[in-house]
Amino acid sequence: MGLLGIIWGASFLSIKVGLEEIPFVTLVMHRVAWACAILWAYVVIRRLPVPADPRIWGAFLVMGLLNNVIPFSLMAWGQQFIETGLTSIFNAGTAIFGVLVAALVFADERLTLRKGVGVLVAFAGVAVAIGLDSLRQFDIRSLAQLAVIGGTISYAFASAWARKTLKGLTPPVAAAGMLTGAMLILLPAALYVDGMPQWPALPATYAAVAYFAVFGTALAYLLYYRVLAMAGAGNAMLVTLLIPPVAIVLGAVVLGERLAPQAFAGFGLLAIGLLILDGRILRLMRG
């Protein structure tokens, strides 16, 4: 979990660096394309069974849209206008929307009192991190923050879709199929929006693309599913709490970013909300 938190935390920095030279749709295409190739190579080497059912491949297409195309694009666009650390704080809210979507879709995921309190506290954290002044002014910065939050909502729907349609698949095959579906959407979108990709001029851009494609996407998916199998969904959710501190520190050290005090206060409330959702803190207090 610690390694995964570090990898994903540093991914926000690498995306910010890549955005200096590559348009955001093309950047997302690079992230998905190289990770897709790596995961399929892994599937072939491991000789994992690949589904032939067209319905599964249709599910991959939808999953790629919900879990890659929409969130990656919204967050990359938003990160052009807001700090790396702030993006990672909003990303930690994925679990909030995951709980709400699951309660709407699945009968066994009803919203209990504990979950409701956790969601409300976490929502308060997101609101504090955004800042009421930002929403009143509604400038490009506030729009960018809402775009990042929109990406977290898409992640929540992706989680529900995966539970309904991708049962029984090995994690590497599911991840490779999902990225393939995303590529079918992103390749024509990048060509239409940004034109033919140009070779970057800066070595830092190549390093950034290599990092978030190889480590932040391909390796991270394999690690995430490993954590999920070893520690369960509750522990995996808490990875989102490890990401913002890494992203905030790297943004400050490498890019000289400074977050407003309200961002840290918002993250504190968000963390408390997620811990309430997890439930173990309350059980320890009772014990």
Image (tube, rainbow, N blue to C red):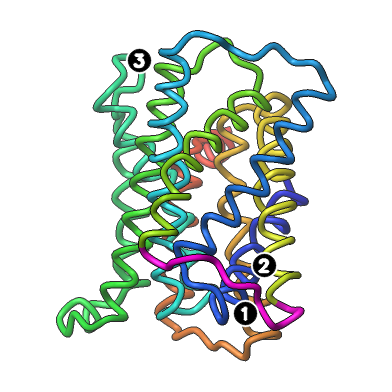
Say which element carries label 1: helix
Q: Which of marks 2 and 3 precedes in the sequence?
A: 3
Q: Which kind of residue does numbered mark 3 sit on?
A: Asp
Residue at horizontal 39 percent and vertical 40 percent from the top: 66
Q: CA distance from mark 1 to mark 2?
A: 8 Å
Q: Tell me: 58 left or right of 138.
A: right
Q: Nearer the viewer, mark 3 or mark 2?
A: 2
How many residues crowd mark 1 within 10 Å: few (<14), some (14–19), many (20+)? many
Q: Nearer the viewer, mark 3 or mark 1?
A: 1
Mark number, residue 246 = 2
Q: Which of marks 2 and 1 precedes in the sequence?
A: 2
Q: Which residue lies under the disc numbered 1?
A: 251
Picture quarter with the C terminus: top right
Residue 134's image quarter?
Answer: bottom left
Residue 45 appears in view: yes
Residue 26: x and y in percent read: 50, 63
Observer-nearest of 168 and 266? 168
Residue at horizontal 39 percent and vertical 70 percent from the top: 78
Observer-nearest of 126 and 84? 84
Residue numbers of the magenta segment: 193-204
